[in-house]
């Protein structure tokens, strides 16, 4: 099955589905939902087959396809997947059907076209798959930019208050970051031998100063997308305004394009520049952990709070990447997957609370657990997974990141652990103010608050809960796939894990 065009088909399937759903009449909203859900499930099945066909321990990049596109620029439709891309592709395939099911009534509440909303979700899935599957720098850049369009319209047309402001801010921030990347892509083509092929550019001989400037062009674009401090300010507005399902994809997948881009493009293509910039990148990441966690503690808006927690989590991913250790790198990629599952679940459950209350403000709840105890329990679990409680999947990835960082940057690793304490504070305080304590009398007057978790909502949250527990106790299926790709990336960078130390005569010696 190695020669089967998995990646091109996987990229095109959601696009075809988006076109089909978009042409369904507005009066047939229910039909549009069913077709969109069925189509996304087909993508999931296809992704699982690809996962099974992937050979652990085989070639670094598998399922490679390459088709001519712009011969004069040596631009090709080239797709390939290593272990890092593969786990992200499967994450997309898992999340999208659950988001579609969770968003079943979002378009009606926004009083907008139902078929258009679900067509946009499928179009977004197409661009997300494409950006992770691309093995041509120009093709990656195209997907990187086109990905903004469906999310812009989802936020701007179906979001809450100030949706236009949030959509424009999201678009402008990402567009400006993309312009830095465009400049770097053009420069890379000039100095890299007039090619956009990833492997050829990794092997290209680029002068040190030129490589550092090109690295910064890519890094700024990825730092905005991630987002890392201080490029983060667009996320609380976009995440707080977008429909809960779209927000789950925004923080669960779209933001990962930034950290994926650093791993796939910055590190292998500019190894010297990556080593040169690593201390600054780690400092930025640690600042982001503490700064975002402190801001999350003071939030009164549930969706903005979850958005700030994501910024803090991306700091952990950042320090793991730039620690240049196998444990740190594997932990970072695993964190990308686990964060998508945990924060996706948290956003979806928060959306269920907001849909019942008609408000995202923490102060508008209070004692809600007395009315919806099961839903409150799921919120509690999602919060604990988000703060990386042992037994949940994020704990494994956070532990690996900190261990991998501590071996080379002890001080930064110790400071970063303060973020774990702050995470416990903002998650537990949010849960206490929302679901515990004296019942807010206003909640009893809202009919929707008398309905605990529904069957549809159970179907949405159950797979995520199961995966978070499964990978919390048995992450081996993911780490077996991720480890070889991380080790190959470190070889591209020219770094190795620090050797063990031996204690002799009271001294520690290498």
Image: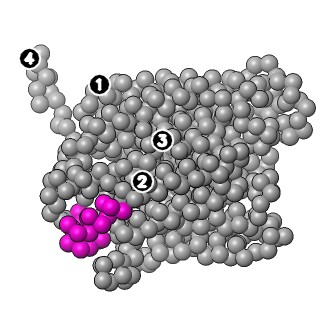
| Foreground label between 1 and 2 | 2
Say which residue label 3 marks.
232
Is the residue under label 2 in contact with that under label 1 (CB below 8 Å)? no
Residue 493: image location, x then y, percent: 22, 51
Which segment did they paint magenta?
182-202
In the rendered image, the vertical position of residue 464 relative to residue 81, given as above or below: above
In the rendered image, the vertical position of residue 273 relative to residue 437, given as above or below: below
Residue 401: image location, x then y, percent: 37, 37
Number of the label disc, if any, that sits on residue 411:
1
Number of the label disc, if any, that sits on residue 177:
2
| Foreground label between 3 and 4 | 3
Nearer-N-terminus badge (4/1)? 1
| Foreground label between 2 and 4 | 2
Within 10 angstroms of label 1, few (less than 14), some, or many (20 or more) residues?
Answer: few
Dominant secondary structure of the magenta stretch? helix
Q: Nearer the viewer, residue 452 or 310?
A: 310
Is the residue under label 1 in contact with that under label 4 (CB below 8 Å)? no
Dot 4 falls on a residue whose secondary structure is loop
Q: Is residue 2 left or right of residue 360?
A: left
Q: Quadrant of residue 331?
A: top left
Q: Quadrant of the N terminus?
A: bottom left
| Residue located at (28% from left, 37% from top) | 280
């Amino acid at each position: 099955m190695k020669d089967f065009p998995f990646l091109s088909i996987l990229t095109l399937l959601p696009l075809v589905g988006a076109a089909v759903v978009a042409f369904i009449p507005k009066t047939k909203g229910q039909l549009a939902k069913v077709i969109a859900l069925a189509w996304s499930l087909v993508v999931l099945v296809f992704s699982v087959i690809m996962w099974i066909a992937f050979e652990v321990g085989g070639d670094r990049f598998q399922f490679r396809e390459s088709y001519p596109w712009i011969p004069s620029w040596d631009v090709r439709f080239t797709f390939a997947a290593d272990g890092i891309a593969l786990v992200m592709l499967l994450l997309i395939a898992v999340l999208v059907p659950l988001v579609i099911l969770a968003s079943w009534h979002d378009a009606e509440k926004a009083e907008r076209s139902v078929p258009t909303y679900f067509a946009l979700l499928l179009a977004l899935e197409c661009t997300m798959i494409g950006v992770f599957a691309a093995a041509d720098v120009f093709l990656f850049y195209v997907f990187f930019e086109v990905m903004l369009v469906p999310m812009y319209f989802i936020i701007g047309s179906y979001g809450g208050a100030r949706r236009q402001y949030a959509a424009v801010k999201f678009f402008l921030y990402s567009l400006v970051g993309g312009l830095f990347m465009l400049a770097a892509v053009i420069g890379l083509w000039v100095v890299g031998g007039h090619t956009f092929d990833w492997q050829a550019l990794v092997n290209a001989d680029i002068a040190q100063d030129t490589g550092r400037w090109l690295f910064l062009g890519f890094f700024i674009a990825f730092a905005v997308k991630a987002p890392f401090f201080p490029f983060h300010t667009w996320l609380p507005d976009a995440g707080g305004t977008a429909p809960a399902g779209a927000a789950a994809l925004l923080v669960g997948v779209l933001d990962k394009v930034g950290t994926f881009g650093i791993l796939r493009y910055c590190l292998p293509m500019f190894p010297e520049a990556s080593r040169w910039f690593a201390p600054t990148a780690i400092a930025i990441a640690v600042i982001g952990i503490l700064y975002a966690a402190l801001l999350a503690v003071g939030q009164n808006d549930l969706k903005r709070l979850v958005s700030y927690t994501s910024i803090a989590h991306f700091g952990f991913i950042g320090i793991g990447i730039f620690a240049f250790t196998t444990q740190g790198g594997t932990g970072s990629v695993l964190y990308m997957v686990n964060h998508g599952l945990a924060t996706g679940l948290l956003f979806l459950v928060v959306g269920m609370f907001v849909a019942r209350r008609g408000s995202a403000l923490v102060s508008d709840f209070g004692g809600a657990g007395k009315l919806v105890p099961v839903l409150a329990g799921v919120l509690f679990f999602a919060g604990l997974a988000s703060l990386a409680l042992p037994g949940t999947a994020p704990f494994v990835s956070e532990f690996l990141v900190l261990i991998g960082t501590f071996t080379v940057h002890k001080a930064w690793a110790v400071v970063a652990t303060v973020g774990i304490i702050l995470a416990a504070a903002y998650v537990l305080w949010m849960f206490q103010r929302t679901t515990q304590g004296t019942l807010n009398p206003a909640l009893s007057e809202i009919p929707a608050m008398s309905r605990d978790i529904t069957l549809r909502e159970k179907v949405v949250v159950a797979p995520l809960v199961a995966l978070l527990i499964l990978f919390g106790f048995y992450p081996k299926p993911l780490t077996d796939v991720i480890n070889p790709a991380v080790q190959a990336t470190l070889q591209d960078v020219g770094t190795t894990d620090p050797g063990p130390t031996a204690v002799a005569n009271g001294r520690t010696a290498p």
